[in-house]
Amino acid sequence: MKIYLRIAFAVALTAFCGIAALAATAPAFVSDKSHDYFGYFLPSEPVKVGKFQLKDFFIGGKDDFKSFESGKADKAFAAVMIEFEDVTSPKKTAEDGQEYYTGQIRVLPTSYSVGNGKVNFSGSDAKLGAITFAGTLDKDFFKKPAPDVPHPDDRPMLRGKLTIGGKVFNVAFNWFGGD
């Protein structure tokens, strides 16, 4: 009888809490592949922890999600990831003339969910600690000037709470479609 009560409780809890109840016990990678979320989300205000500054929050395209979620992506890339720069490291100049810091950290996910206008991410880094993000896309994010191209705008398209090593930041990100 106890086992049936435990199963019933687990089913009820899952129904009540949704996927979040399951995500708490195991890594999950969930994405809505019916929309194109691709882009580099650049912080509208600097976010810095020690010598590390947030560079971008990356969300891949539909194919990136399919590849990553099926285990076919390389080990240095994920469909959702966060990048930081060590602002004390030397600078170099890229092919396009932009300067960048040579010390970089790419945080890959232990779990993520992207869909219904929400973006959630969990990962960790040896230097930065546990990193989480819970955010919401702007209602105008999917207004498209051309097929399958998210609307670039000079205002934040993603807002939320970013936690880095226990420190919480309210963040806003502008969208950038890349080179």
Image (cartoon, grey):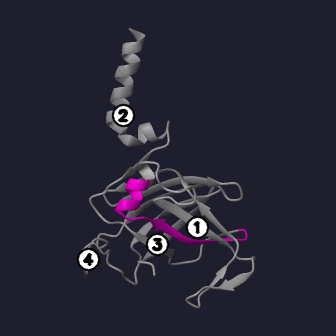
Magenta region: 50-67
Number of callouts in the render?
4
Amino acid type of disc 3? Answer: Phe
Q: Nearer the viewer, mark 3 or mark 2?
A: 3
Question: Disc 1 versus disc 4: distance between alpha carbons?
Answer: 26 Å
Amino acid type of disc 1? Answer: Glu
Question: Disc 3 versus disc 2: distance between alpha carbons?
Answer: 32 Å
Q: Earlier in the sequence, mark 3 or mark 1?
A: 3
Which residue matches tag 3? 41
Question: Within 10 angstroms of label 3, few (less than 14), some, or many (20 or more) residues?
Answer: many
Which residue matches tag 2? 14
Residue 50, placed above or below residue 101: above
Q: State the image coordinates of residue 143 (x, y, percent, origin top left).
A: 25, 75
Q: Earlier in the sequence, mark 4 or mark 3?
A: 3
| Whether label 1 touches label 2, CB < 8 Å | no
Amino acid type of disc 2? Answer: Thr
Taking depth in this image into account, of 77 and 46 the one nearest to the observer is: 77
